[in-house]
Amino acid sequence: MTRSEARQEGESAAQLISKKITELGDWRGEMLGRIRALIKEADPDILEELKWRGTPVWSHEGIVCTGETYKKVVKMTFAKGAFLKDPSRLFNSSLEGNVRRAIDIHEGEELNAPALKALIREAVALNVSDKKAAPSKRGGR
């Protein structure tokens, strides 16, 4: 069943993310599940979506981060990571980019939950402030 067929049958993005976590069946699924829980703890109003061939995406007034799984790493990519303070130095990937920053998590590594939740809250706050600062596109003279 394709993702679009699943959506037509009524599965939400949250259900499809849960299914992906279960189907991985290894440390990557467990890690993605822990990351997801921390994201929801940091921002209970976060929106879960699936984009780009089934990549979990968490948004709040814009993309906060994605959760990608590869053979040897689970990657959290923050859409505006270059603009976030990272005093705990969680960002360890995509450091040369102008906008995005990522965290590569390898098997056996522990998450710094307080620092990760602080980073997520900061990313949400940045999205919300950017949204408020953007001029309305609705017209009016």
Image: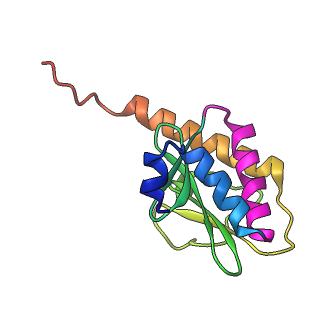
Residue 21: % across, % down: 70, 60
Examine the rendered structure and indicate whether residue 22 appears above or below residue 116. below
Residue appearing at x 52%, y 74% in the figure: 96
Residue appearing at x 67%, y 36% in the figure: 43
Relative side of 25 to 70, left or right: right
Residue 40: % across, % down: 70, 40
Examine the rendered structure and indicate whether residue 17 appears above or below residue 109. above
The magenta region covers 26-45
Q: Is residue 89 visible?
A: no
Residue appearing at x 85%, y 70% in the figure: 109
Q: Quadrant of the C terminus?
A: top left
Judge by depth and name the residue closer to the eye, 106 or 4. Answer: 4
Residue 48: % across, % down: 57, 44
Examine the rendered structure and indicate whether residue 104 appears above or below residue 31. below
Residue 81: % across, % down: 56, 57
Residue appearing at x 75%, y 38% in the figure: 41
Q: Hey, which quadrant is residue 107 in on the image?
A: bottom right
Q: Is residue 28 visible?
A: yes
